[in-house]
Image: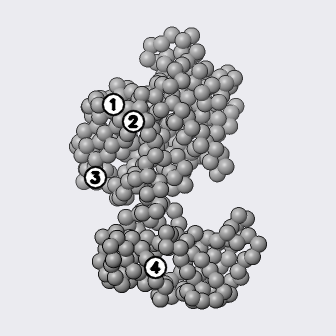
Amino acid sequence: MNQTLGTGAEVRLEGIAKRYGKVEAVKPLDLVIEGGSLVTLLGPSGCGKTTLLRMIAGLEQPSAGRISIGGRDVTLLSAGERNVSMVFQSYALFPHMSVRENVAYGLVSSGMGKKDAAERAEAALTMVGLSGFGARLPSEISGGQQQRVAVARALVLEPAVLLFDEPLSNLDTRLRRSMREEIRALQQRLGLTVVYVTHDQSEALAVSDKIVVMRNAEIAQSGTPEALYASPENVFVATFMGEANHVRGAIESISGDHARVALDGVLLELTHRGMAPGPADMVIRPEAIRLADTGPGIAGQVMRATYMGSHSEYLLATPLGELFAILPERLRRRQPGSAVFVNFDPEGVVLVRP
């Protein structure tokens, strides 16, 4: 099996939409997924991400728009004619077939001889670290190994695009972490174009070249993981891309690209992002909060303190409202009821739109 099978096919969606009667499952949108990249569709349940993935796969017919893969219009083609493979949330392995037979099934169904298909299946299993597991039944391997079998079954077809629908949701936390790293490493090694659906922001941050955050059947914002975390455009994206405290402050003045912002007496210099002087929404990342025993700062009180091993988490009562803070305080922990003064690292505070 070709170890560099990925063709890096570009996926282009133009005005793509899906309606079920009067319900808009996906509102008209444009999206380019660059060849050889891993793009994650991220959002809460019901936002349209899985419907969008299924339209790329050919499992759902769009109500409007055009889909091209590798420069070829596939809008009206069936799933089998698109050269894409999909790894489902449930893995969908045949329980009565061996691991090797599961992986070879698609090849045999398309007319390949059983001997050649078995050889290709073994090569795919080796690629995902399951050499020697071919004779076992799915019930005789772990959940993480079943997930790898599902990936091997998709890879053996040498797809132009590989699609993942919540592939790690059935695994425990530690196994999820190792499997997402394996998927990312495999994608980069083979140069595959991957579209990956999840509702888990940490998973999206870990594997993606680009994240497309979806809300209410449309794209809320797309960009690199770093850009979405550091520069969210609105409160929804900020709070969905990790923990964030949403507060209200005031832009006092604008100078060049920067704004002088007041947060209950604490003054910060922030990028104004096109906003005018006056009341303003902003988000504060928990790790950008600094606590001190004396001023200056915003006077507050520790409501809850939680020891997390590598760090401590605090819930603070302040004039801005309740603030969630994460501090690398392993040896010294502040106790509930203790008075503190709150300050902020400006790089962790961002002006946003509501």
Give the position of the N terminus as an image quadrant: top right
Q: Which of the two discs, 3 and 4, labels the residue nearer the N terminus?
A: 3
Amino acid type at image mark 3: Lys
Give whichever of 265, 156 is nearer the camera. Answer: 265
Using a 10 Å C-alpha cutoff, classify the residue at mark 1 as few (fewer than 14 neighbours), some (14 to 19) or many (20 or more). some
| 2 or 4: mark nearer the eye | 4
Residue beneath the point at 36% across and 84% down:
252
Amino acid type at image mark 4: Leu
| 1 or 4: mark nearer the eye | 4
Q: Name the mark on residue 27.
A: 3
Secondary structure beneath label 1: loop
Q: Is residue 354 visible?
A: no
How far is mark 2 from mark 3, CA to CA?
Answer: 24 Å
How far is mark 2 from mark 4, CA to CA?
Answer: 41 Å
Q: Which of the two discs, 2 and 3, labels the residue nearer the N terminus?
A: 3
| 3 or 1: mark nearer the eye | 1
Secondary structure beneath label 3: strand
